[in-house]
Image (spheres, helix red, strand yellow):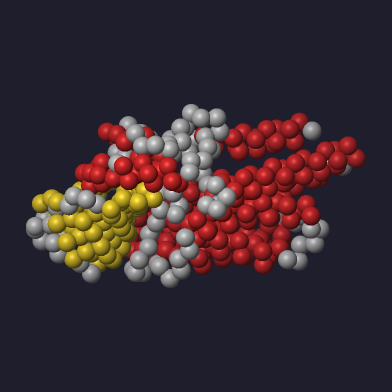
Amino acid sequence: MRLLALLAALLVTFLTAAPAQAHVRATSVAVDLRGHGGEVAAVVDVEYDVLGRLLSLDGVVSPDADGGVAEVPAGVRRASLDAHAGEVAAYVGGALRLSRSSIGCAAQEGGRVELTDSGAVRVALAYECAASGALTARSDVFGATDGLVDDVRTTVAYDVDGIRGSALLDAARTSVTVGHADPLGEIPGFVLLGAEHLLFGLDHVLFLLALLLGAKRLRDVVEVATAFTVAHSVTLVLAAIGWVGVPGWIVEPLIALSIAFVALDNLLSPRTSHRLPVVFAFGLLHGLGFAGALSVDGPASVSMLVNLVSFNVGIEIAQLAIIAVAFPALLFLRRAATGPVAARALMLGTVGAAVAVAGAGLVWFVERSPLLT
């Protein structure tokens, strides 16, 4: 009973505290560079809440709010971006510096600013480079001088002068030179990025926990984990290289709905013969979500494929870590519940956990559905 209470307390704490930490400890930036010679186009995606606190935009979710999960109508944020478009473009253009042969490229005024389907701020800029030579990109977007976050990961994808690739920048490495990146040297960073995305992505974690609640044997865990892994790996690669594209406003609500479905399916359906096809289908959705987080798209290259595989390996490591901790704990509880009172308590705890997970999924579905908010 005490162990069940402890697990329930941990679940409640996880559900309420994790969102409050969002966009405070770390943030991500995605940069896409395309061009040849003197003209280079850059598209930069950043989180609205971080940019909003920096530039005093409307509709920013405060990290100190209760739960930190308040939703803001997209119209409020679009209106604020329209009113501050020049300021937003000037900040990003000043923080993303391009150069050739150590001579800086000039960011043209009037960059396009918009709110994407996933809720990120997208800034499109054009640069003019007077010099020739390899292009170097340096990103100080949300850098240490801004004092907003502790950790910033910047994914840079490029197709410049016929050279394609991607790199991951952080506090220790703030610039990349096109054609000089070592694909193998990027592996640790992208593995860590993949692991962090799964571990700190509460929706993906709850989906895994919902699957584990319905697993009775180790074989069940292996089967659903394999189906989920194969499915999300397929769509992750296809979406990242641009062969599949589904708007975030469609993918994100369906991911939330998948959590609720699997959790409720554990309670309402004693038969599990349909479980693998369902998990595979939902895994395809989660792969699209992973690709959106990675933000590396465009034509395939050796560097990009290495980074994709590394990111996916990180996801699998985190997934295995969750399974290795959660499933043995569930088995222990089931085997320890030998008496009628303990068995009933375990049943009630399992039902309560499934209902809590399903409730979280349904709430996220409503919050993420543009037609319902």
Q: Could you say which is closer to the camera, residue 319 or residue 201?
A: 201
Q: Which residue is painted at 44% across and 54% down in the image?
A: 117
Q: Could you say which is closer to the camera, residue 164 or residue 55?
A: 55
Residue 140 location (% of width, % of height): 26, 42
Residue 185 location (% of width, % of height): 33, 55
Q: Which residue is painted at 31% across and 42% down in the image?
A: 83
Q: Could you say which is closer to the camera, residue 15 or residue 122?
A: 122
Determine if residue 112 is in view.
yes
Q: Which residue is painted at 36% across and 41% down in the image?
A: 80
Relative to 102, 6 lies left or right: right
Which corner quadrant holds the N terminus?
Answer: top right
Residue 144 location (% of width, % of height): 30, 35
Determine if residue 170 is in view.
no
Q: How many dots with numbers?
A: 0
Q: Height in image: 223 above or below 332?
A: below
Q: Height in image: 25 above or below 212?
A: above
Residue 95 location (% of width, % of height): 24, 43
Relative to 5, 25 lies left or right: left
Relative to 58, 133 lies left or right: left
Q: Which residue is painted at 42% across and 55% down in the image?
A: 294
